[in-house]
Image (cartoon, grey):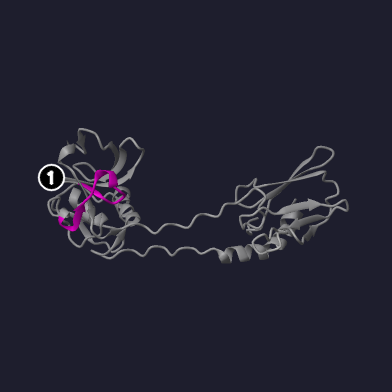
Amino acid sequence: MGRFTRLLTAVLVTATAFTTAAVITPAAHAESVRDGQITRSEVIARAQYWVDHQPGPYSQTQKSPGPGDGWLYRRDCSGYVSMTWHLTDSLGSATLPNVSHNISRNDLKAGDMMVYPGTHVFLFHRWLDGNGNFEYYTFGATPVRHLRANINNASLDNHPNSAYRAMRYNRIVDDAPQPPKRKHTDMDFSGDGSADLVSTTTGGELRYFPNNAGSNAEGRPFEGYKVTGTGWETADRVLEADISGDGAADLLSTTPDGELRYFPNNASGNA
């Protein structure tokens, strides 16, 4: 069992290195500056920060720090939204609309707000389904919470539904789309998203056939092979599948006397 792991690792290390080098990892989004542009994901992360690190009792005079630069924000509903948007000032529910614009409720996205001007405001998180159910962040007379409601309810967060306006911060931006994840197959030993082949010979050799379809213009994807080991003459069947769930194919073999053997793929370097 260990022999295949070591031998296949040696064979695949080069292919794995090339595969890794070809993957472009997007740079992490830089933390915003006060009153600057801010992504929706950062707004939600900041909102969750006060849920995870409760700032203290509700107060219209006391302040607590937000994440990152530790800037202080008033501990009430509008101070909370001001913190999530990373504003310089703790605006009120009557003045938050000055840095926002009206949107349709159907267009609500993460980081937008529902505001009852002069009375209350909460931060929209996400739709849960097509029936109007959604999640939101709020700081009322109780601790900062992450709750659920329905956009058609008679009241929202203890205030009349009809009094709210859906609004969007002028400097919020959508997050850059993430590149699609590479799809692995059960027979992918090299981790490049294409199936490879492994076979045995009557002489007991285990042979690995990497898939080079991406570079083979003549249409022979499995041209060439590598001998990875010997001692396989007792195997009467070899199966390829990702048993470990790490995105790389492993091997299962059976012997004439009914023994099942498992050979994990150690191409990633994990023992």
The magenta stretch spans residue 244: no
Q: Residue furthest right?
A: 203
Specify few, some or many for label 1: CA neighbours under 10 Å numbering under 14, 14-19, or 20 or more.
Answer: some
Measuring from the top left, give residue 20's x and y in whole percent.
58, 63
Measuring from the top left, give residue 220's x and y in whole percent.
73, 59
- Could you tell me which residue is drawn at 60 percent across and 63 percent down? 19
The magenta stretch spans residue 101: yes
Relative to 224, residue 120 above or below: above
The magenta span reads 98-114
Q: Residue furthest front?
A: 218
Q: Nearer the viewer, residue 183 or 14?
A: 183
In the visual, does 212 lie left or right of 131?
right
Quarter of the picture containing the C terminus is: bottom right
In the visual, does 219 lie left or right of 178?
right
In the visual, does 216 lie left or right of 199?
left
Measuring from the top left, give residue 225's x and y in whole percent.
77, 60
- Could you tell me which residue is drawn at 21 percent across and 39 percent down? 157
The residue singled out by tag 1 in the image is: 119
Measuring from the top left, give residue 47's x and y in whole percent.
29, 51
Say if residue 2 shows up in the picture: no
In the visual, does 203 lie left or right of 163?
right
- Could you tell me which residue is drawn at 21 percent across and 55 percent down? 82
**Judging from the image, what secondary structure is the residue with disc 1 in?**
loop
Q: Residue furthest top?
A: 154
Kind of residue sitting beneath label 1: Thr
Q: Nearer the viewer, residue 75 or 153?
A: 153
Say if residue 204 shows up in the picture: yes
Q: Nearer the viewer, residue 44 or 40?
A: 40
- Could you tell me which residue is drawn at 18 percent across and 58 percent down? 99
